[in-house]
Amino acid sequence: MLQVVYLIFLILGTVLPFSQFIPFLLDDGLDLNLFFEQLFTNRISSFFGMDVIVSVLVLLTFVIWEGSRLKMKYLWGHVLTSLLGVSCGLPLFLLMRQRKLKETAE
């Protein structure tokens, strides 16, 4: 059941953010200056931007630490996915971690 919940979060965490990012890419391309300008336009967007940046760092630490501890394969894939977005990377890693824990318990 927990794996299903993580899968649902993975789908939502991929579709919802990219529903906003893809139109930006189509309109402006990968203009990083514009991206960061818009990300830090005001205090509220800066709050969310900084929160996500710190969350990515925490997630990367967790993925590397916990993934190594459990001897999970393809940690580089989880690192790359986390860089796409925490809302995508975290549920994917938790799903794969849950599968690994279940496999180890059997």
Image (cartoon, rainbow, N blue to C red):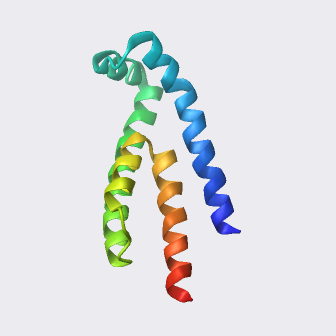
Q: Residue furthest right?
A: 1
Q: From the viewer's perspective, is 53 left or right of 44?
A: left
**Which of these two is toward me, 87 or 99?**
99
Residue drawn where x is 34% and y is 77% of the image: 69
Tell me: residue 97, above or below residue 89: below
Q: From the viewer's perspective, is 12 left or right of 41?
A: right
Tell me: residue 63, above or below residue 82: below
Quarter in which the C terminus is drawn: bottom right
Residue drawn where x is 51% and y is 79% of the image: 101
Q: Residue furthest bottom?
A: 106
Residue 31 position in % (x across, y down) = 32, 17
Residue 76 position in % (x across, y down) = 31, 56
Tell me: residue 53, above or below residue 33: below
Which image quadrant is residue 33 in?
A: top left
**Which of these two is toward me, 53 or 106?**
106
Quarter in which the N terminus is drawn: bottom right
Residue 71 position in % (x across, y down) = 35, 76
**Which of these two is toward me, 7 or 44?**
7
Residue drawn where x is 34% and y is 53% of the image: 79
Which image quadrant is residue 37 in?
A: top left
Residue 64 position in % (x across, y down) = 31, 64
Q: Residue furthest top?
A: 27
